[in-house]
Each structure stands twice: as structure tokens, then as C-alpha cells.
Amino acid sequence: MRDHLTRYLPIATWGREYNRTTLSNDLLAALIVTIMLIPQSLAYALLAGLPPEAGLYASIAPIILYAIFGTSRALAVGPVAVVSLMTAAALGNIAEQGTMGYAAAALLLAGMSGVILLGMGLFRLGFVANFLSHPVIAGFITASGMIIAASQLKHILGINAEGHNLLDLLISLVEHLPETNWITAIIGVSATGFLFWVRKGLKPALKRAGVRSGIADVATKAGPVAIVVATTFAVWAFGLDARGVKIVGEVPQSLPPLTLPVFSTDLVRQLLLPAFLISIIGFVESISVAQTLAAKKRQRIDPDQELIGLGAANVAASLTGGFPVTGGFSRSVVNFDAGAETPAAGAYTAVGLAIAAVALTPLIFFLPKATLAATIIVAVLSLVDFSILKRSWSYSKADFAAVLATILLTLGIGVEAGVSVGVGLSILLHLYKSSRPHIAEVGLVPGTEHFRNILRHKVKTDPKVITMRVDESLYFANARFLEDSIQDRVAADPDVRHVILQCSAINEIDFSALESLEAINNRLEEMNVKLHLSEVKGPVMDRLEKTHFLEELTGKVFLTQFEAAKVANESCDQLPAS
Amino acid sequence: MRDHLTRYLPIATWGREYNRTTLSNDLLAALIVTIMLIPQSLAYALLAGLPPEAGLYASIAPIILYAIFGTSRALAVGPVAVVSLMTAAALGNIAEQGTMGYAAAALLLAGMSGVILLGMGLFRLGFVANFLSHPVIAGFITASGMIIAASQLKHILGINAEGHNLLDLLISLVEHLPETNWITAIIGVSATGFLFWVRKGLKPALKRAGVRSGIADVATKAGPVAIVVATTFAVWAFGLDARGVKIVGEVPQSLPPLTLPVFSTDLVRQLLLPAFLISIIGFVESISVAQTLAAKKRQRIDPDQELIGLGAANVAASLTGGFPVTGGFSRSVVNFDAGAETPAAGAYTAVGLAIAAVALTPLIFFLPKATLAATIIVAVLSLVDFSILKRSWSYSKADFAAVLATILLTLGIGVEAGVSVGVGLSILLHLYKSSRPHIAEVGLVPGTEHFRNILRHKVKTDPKVITMRVDESLYFANARFLEDSIQDRVAADPDVRHVILQCSAINEIDFSALESLEAINNRLEEMNVKLHLSEVKGPVMDRLEKTHFLEELTGKVFLTQFEAAKVANESCDQLPAS
């Protein structure tokens, strides 16, 4: 019972150890994260095409639900850039931004994503996320960062532009460029420039000025808040909204509302793939942040329980006027660095944001959208990393191909196409590689019992005996390749009387491969050649012993290759020359 | 030049060695195969829903083209049961049987299949066929055999029935059962019974009667011809066609006509998946027959060239009034057993069939369709083999699942669904298995240098050193599982100071796994634990040396696990207790 409780309710573990020190550490972390999250939440709502308050709502209830069900002690859940972009892309096909239908679809999307994550957690299907290879994720994040940055340029310039891929966006931007509102552009460009400087130049400058490192850090984090305050004040003071600068405007002063997603089979069908991709990508982003932070304190993360935590968070988002959420990198790192010790820090952050939603929203009436766009651009451009192309190219052409395809398709067609094709291509390339495994013909290194590739080493061989070592598990995709390779080798050399298959690298033999081995055995028998196996691993041997293969095998199974080669040589000597 | 010539034109190899002995052997084989093929060709045309002459035409030009381009010396190309069934299923969605549109679509299907095969051959894409695992093929063949047999029952009973899956067929048969034509049923059932007896009982009976084995064989092969002659005579003599027995009727007396498939993008799109599946399944059936026969004479088969041979044969079928063809099992075995030595035997068979098409077609006017149906049923029921379920169950549950899914879907929905889902499921299950690889914690077997699983053997371990052996290549699908496993193990045990990854079973590390290793290394460093590698294979090490990983690695790379454990232990002794 206790085990079940702690498995499904991690709060039961850390709750018992809670004391005054953890409380004060958590409270301090919560304060810092709350200040950072206010502009970020508004900005990601803008990116998702939703009203600004949705960003605050999506950061309140989800954080609390994750605190109860999640296993990471420092993960901060809420809207993040990539998932917000995917939300906008999914909803863009369904309704106009700003309509009730759009907001309703966002709730449904969060709800579906939550149910998918919960289902995967309960049925322990977290492994599905493993098929998102690192090259695909890296390519997708880089391409998404570029699309997000491009999508915010319209706010920076005060124009309209649409499109869910880079090309459409850029064309639309160029078309509307003459409509640029210059005051908006001045605010947007200077906010962007300021934030870049805060990120890159402020801390070194403060340090040179002799400011303590801790204070310099806080100043850096406060940059976005400072620019929000400054530009809001400027718009209010000079009445810039009357001169065409778009502002956030009236935001309801309220706690998150109770919302019930509208259900329609048609809508569910349309949102199924996006919801699935959002779930998987959100999960992958979240789990890698969680594991990196957990390692720093030798804590463990349970991936299946993480699915439940994130699922609950998304269901909460859909019931409280939010949109899809996940564990974010920057907010989690800030939370961790600020000293958060338990998920309770998240709950305090939620309280802070709830206070902000109730009390502070009138203050952001004059906040220019260009400022929010600037914070998004500066945040996402740090995600863009083309070095992955170079690194994967030098390591493996197949991985490079997956990165490149994902980047090009995400930029050229859209996020869903990019991820889907990237995943499909990774799987195909992996299968292709393992379908043509490395097969080495080996011989004895003189004076030892070791066998090595005859092409790489000076080794002793016997013309009547061939030893082949397959450096791959045998399964359907390479079973026929093995048949071809052995048949080719033996057909080309009429002297051969024994074939030894050295199985030291074979971790599995599936049913197809078993039948191929039977075929090889029978065909070699037709050619008057015996088939032997050597160094078969324990689990593989256990399997083979359940079949008739070992009885039908014309040769023997040897524990070591040395023994196999010795016996085969001797039996050759006894045979009359063929 | 010579190399290129013999690669793409295998005829150049065997043509030079052709002499009088091979000629007479080939001629005899051709005669036997021709006699066997006449009823079989007519029957498979019936199965494909085409007029009987199409079966003859599909056996003439394709044989010759294969003789020129194929690498097998005994393979006989023509209509086969499974491909004919797939043809009927593909065309059934497009046109009514018996219409011009239906026959035209059959030509297009053969042409597309030919182009696909040629393309795969030229670009050496034969490996694609590897993804049809043995369980999927076995399940598909068994289910197809049942559907084909069921589809022929309507001819046996002289009723109408339709459906491309077993359920639809059986329902339709039961509905029309009252319309049974009893004379047809008597012919059909007795022909089926006779053929079964010929197959199972005749040869033993003849042998008991002292007849020589060779003659008994010929008698067995002649069974279908005998029943064709007998039932045709009966229909003619008693005017049974006037009493409702459906007969083959008028067959044009002509050589294969020149036909040009009609091209329409819409039709091409509809036929693309069927054409692809027909190509792959035909290729797989053909290549396994070819390799089995080649092994008996120590000959080799070039799979890529086989694609070209089969592709050319299908293009020929589409240009001469045929339908999709491939290398058939029974006809090839008969050809081989009859002594065929070179593909020229196929060409002589083609001449024999051409003569039959011109001269013998009037003789089959009164041949009852029920007799052809009987030959099909007897032929395909030998394909039905449910033992695959039992064998795969006892060997591997994953393979069993693939067989079962393929059988159920093929029977319940249709051939295309069965194969597609079967292949998808095989791939998924394979990825799933390799996504949770066997990871053993190993220790030193006392008195040796060997390391074995601590759960299976009595071994020596050091509380500060963990050695883990992963029995699988590391790639994206299992990279995160490795991260989880190591982090879990180390987080659970605060004494650990060294983790050694024994890489003896790791044949590949892809880019995702490399990044996971980097993450593991960094996270272990945060925990003050060193990561070492041992027994890294040559090609894997070559790859790693191109990266920064080895520089960043906190520990070392050791040639042997023994050395790694020794050094790790010693460095532990020097450390102060933590």
C-alpha cells in the first residue's frame, strides 16, 4: 500500500520530510520564478495565439497538479515556446485566432494531450518517446526556434503576417512590410536589443564593475521585467497606443476560470495527431530537464510517473482556461538555481501567479505586444543551434540525414510534418543499417586463442573451414542478408567443408532468423558442408534449445571459437579429399 | 565490360557453356512443365478474375524475359496463386470482373509492378523485402490459401459469391448456397477429391503395386491433366453445359497479343500500394525458391539481378495480355526435378505454351470451371500451415503476435491490410524489444579474468565499482533507457564511485546514444562518480575518436574488463572514504 502510494503520489515521500528550512528555500525560489514567469507566460500565450491571461492560467493549476504527481523536485511546468508554437500550428487549421472556437480548441487540445500522457503513464508506454531520436529533436527545436522568431517579427514591426512554416511567414512579412508602424518597430527593436545585451553583456559588465556574482545574476534575470515596466510606462506616458502601438489591453482580473473543453468527434479526430506529437515532444523536453536537474542531487526520476504528472498538469490546464503545458527548461533551471528543494516551490509559484492574475493585470494594460515578442525572440534564438548539422555529419551520415530532413521539413512544411518524417526516417535508416550488418571472416591469431578479421590482421586460416562473425543480432531485416552472404561465400569456393558461425556479437535470434539458419543449414547440407555455431550467448542458446534446430544442425555448437576451429580442422583431416 | 555484361545479362554466362546434353535435358524438363502449366495457368487466370487465355499469355513472354535477365537456372516464372489473389483483390476495387476496364487494369498493375521491381533492382533496393519477416510471410500465405480456397468454392458449387476477405466470402457463399447447381457440384467435389487422392494416395499405391518411382512421379504430376481431360469429355459427351455447368468456353486461338497498358494518374495512384505489395511479395516468394534450388547445385543467386529479371518478366506480361507474375514454387520445383539445367528450359516451355495457345484452345471449350477451381483448391490448401502459430508461440511471443495479427487481418479485412499491419507490427515489436535491452550487472568470476552476470553466477564485486554490460547496440530507441538504468542504479547506492560500461556486445553507437553517453558522463560527474568504458569494439572506437566524448569522459577506456575493474578498484582504495 505504502509502495503504491509513493509510486503514484510522490508527494507522500517528500511531504513527510518537509520542515522550516525547506519551506524558506522553496518560498525564495518561488518568488524569483514568479517574477520571471509573469512576462514569459503572457508572451507564450501570445505565441499560441491566445489572450494573455491564458498564459497565466496555464501556469497556475498545472504547476500544482505536477507538484502532487510529478517525481522531479525542481521541474517547473507551464507554457513553453515549442509547445506553444505547436499549439498555434494545430489550432490554426481549425479556427481563426481570437475567436471563441480557437480558445475552446486550445482547451480540448490540452485535455487530449493530458489524457494521452495519463494513458501512456498508466500503461507504461513511455518508451514510445524513445523513437524521437536526438537528431530529430535537435533538428526540430532548431527549426521551431527559427519559425517562432519569424512569427514574432510581425509584432515587432506592428504588421500582420501569417503562416505556419518559415517560407509562408517570410513571404507574408515582406508583403506587409510597407505597413510597418515605426513607433512599434522602435519599441520592438530596442527591446530586443536590450534583452540580448542583458543576456550576453550585462553580467560581465556588472562583474567588471565589481558587483557580486549573485546580484549580477538577479539583475540578468530581472531584465525582461525591467523592459516590460519601461515600455509599458512609455506607452502610457506618451499615449503611444493611440498612435498605432498594439498593447495587451484589458485582461480580466480573476483567478483561473473553471472551463470544460467542448467535445466533438470531428474536432478530436483533427487534433489527434497534434495532441499526440505535443504530448511526446513535451514529455521528451520535460524528462531531459528533470533528469539533468535530478542528477545534480543524486535523485531519481520515474519516467512513467512523469507521464502521469504531466498528464495531470495538462488536464488541469484544460479545466482552468489554459493550453498545453510541459516542464520548461529555463524556468526549471531558474527554480533549481534559486534553491527550490521540493515541488512545494511550484505550488508557491502558483500562488504568486494567482495573486498576479487577480491584482496585477490592470498594470499591464499598456504593455506593448512588441515587448512580449522581443522576450520570445530572445528566448527562442538560444534554441537555434546549427552545430548539430556539423556534429552529426562528422559522426554519422544517417543521423545527419535525419537532422537535415527534420529541419528542412519543419521549416518548409510545418512542425508536424517535420517531426513525423524525421521519426520515420530515423527508424528506416536504423533498420537499413542493421539490415546489412558487418560480417567478418575471421582467422586464428598465431600463438593465441583469439580470432580476428582476416582483412585486418595476419591470421591463420584453413581452406576447408570458413569462420564468419556477424556483428549484429539476427532478425528479420538481416536474416536474408546472412543467407545471401554465406551462400555466396561457399558457392564461390568448392573446397569449403565447414562453416563456423561465431555468435559472440549476436544478442538475439528472432523467428525469421531461426528459419534462415535452418535454411542455411539445409542448403549447406546440399553442398556437403557442415554448419557449426560457436560462442552462442546464454539467452540465445536457451531459445534455440526450445526448437528442433540444434537436432537438425549438421555440425556442433562450441563454447569457444578456438575449440570449434580445432574440431572442424581435425574432422577435415579425416575426410578424403573432395 | 565483360563484368557488366554478365552482371546485367546472366544469359551471357550460361549461354557460352550451352551444349547438346544441356539442350536435351532442358527440352525434357520443358515438356513436363508445359503439360503441368496448361491447367495451372488457366486456373490462376480464373483466380485473378481474368479470361483463361490471360493465364497462358502470362506464362509465355515473361518466362523468356526472365530467362534472359534472371540469375536462377531453374526458376519458372508465371502466374502464382498468392499474386493472382492479390491481383483480384486490387482490381476488385477498380472494375467489375469480365469488363475491359478490369483486364486493362490488370495490364497496368503488371506494368507498374515491373517498373517497381526494375527500379528496386537498378537502385539495389532489394533490402526493402527484408522487412517482410518470416512470421508475416507465413501468416499471410496461410491466410491467403484459406481465402483462395474459399473463393473457389463458388465455382465448385456453381453459384455466385463475392468478397475479398474470408468473412465476406463465407457469408456470400451461405446466402447463395440454395442456388447450387448439383451437376457442377458433383464434378467439382469429385475433381477435388480425385486431386487430393492423386497428391496423397496415388504414389504410395503405385509403389506398392511395384511401379517404378520415376513413373509414379510422372503419374502424380499428370493428375491435373487427367481430370481436365476427363471432366471436359464428360461435359461435351453429356451436354452438361446446357444443364448449367459453367465452362471455359471460347478462348481465342492466338499468340499473345501486343497490349499497351492504359495510363491514368488516378488509376496509378489507386494501384500503387497493391503494385508495391505484389512486387515485394512476389520477389520474396521467388527469391526463396531460387535460393533453395541454387543451393542444391552450389550456384549463386544475385538478389538485385533477380529484381531485374522479375521486373522484366512483369513488364513483358503487361505488354502481352498477361497479369502480374513471379517465380512459382511448384512449377520451379517440377522444372528442377525434371532436370532443367539452364534458363533455356524456360524458353522452351514458353514455346510449348505458345503452341498450346494457338492449337489446343478449342479443346478446352467444354472444360468446366469447377475443375479449374478444384486444381486451385488442392494446390493452395498445401500452403495453409497453422503449425507456424504453435512454433512461433513457443519460440517468441513477439513473433507469434506478428503471425496472428497477419492471419487475422488478412482473413478479416484483406490481403493488403494483413501484410501492411504485419510488417508494421514486426518493426514496432523489434524496436520495442531493442528499446529495453538486457542490461546485466557483472562481477569477476574468482580465479579467472571473466566477468559474468551477478544474478546468474557467484562473482566478486566491489561496493564502490559497478560494471554494467548492455547486450545490445546503443541507438535512439534504447539510449534513454540506458540513461534511466544507470542513473537509477547509482542514485540508489551512495557508495558508488565508478561505473564501468562493458561494451563487448555493442556493435554500434548512434548519435543519439553518443549524446546519451555524454549526458550520463556529465550526470555521473555531478554525483562525483567516474564513467569508464571497457572492451569497446574497433569500429565503435573509430567513431568515438572523431568526437570530443573521449576527452570529456571522466574515466578511461580499457581494452579489457579485467584491466578496467583492477584500475577502478585501485583508484578507489586511494580515495578517502566518502
Image (cartoon, coloured by chain):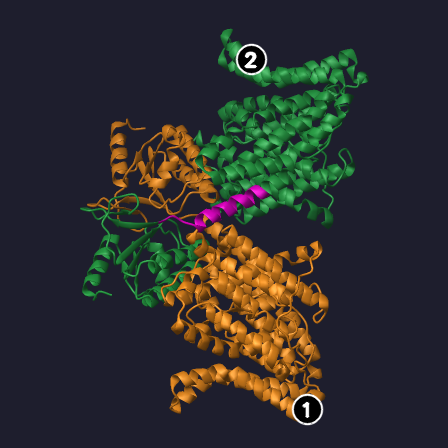
Chain colours: A orange, B green
Kind of residue indicated by mark 1 = Gly
Q: Chain of mark 1?
A: A
For the residue pair B285 and A261, the one nearer the viewer reads as A261
Name the main secondary structure of what is drawn in magenta. Answer: helix
CA–CA distance in space, label 1 to label 2: 105 Å
Q: Residues within 10 Å of mark 1 (few under 14, many from 20)?
A: few
In this rendered view, identify the residue nearer to me: B577 or B402.
B577
In which quadrant of the rendered image does the C terminus of chain A lie?
top left
Instruction: Residue B102: give x, y in percent of width and height.
Output: 74, 37
Examine the rendering and report whether any part of residue B28 can be seen: yes
| In this picture, residue A267 sits left or right of residue B122 | right
Residue placed farthest to the bottom in the image?
A238
Q: Amino acid at mark 2?
A: Leu
Residue B51 in the image: x percent, y percent?
73, 30
Question: How many residues crowd around disc 2 within 10 Å: few (fewer than 14), some, or many (20 or more)?
Answer: some
Mark 1 lies on a secondary structure that is loop
Q: Is residue A497 left or right of residue A445?
A: right
Q: Is residue A273 magenta?
A: no
Residue bearing mark 2: B202
Coordinates of residue B376 in the picture (x, y in percent): 64, 25
> Which chain does the residue under circle 2 lie in?
B
Label 1 sits on residue? A239
Magenta-tinted stretch:
B421-439
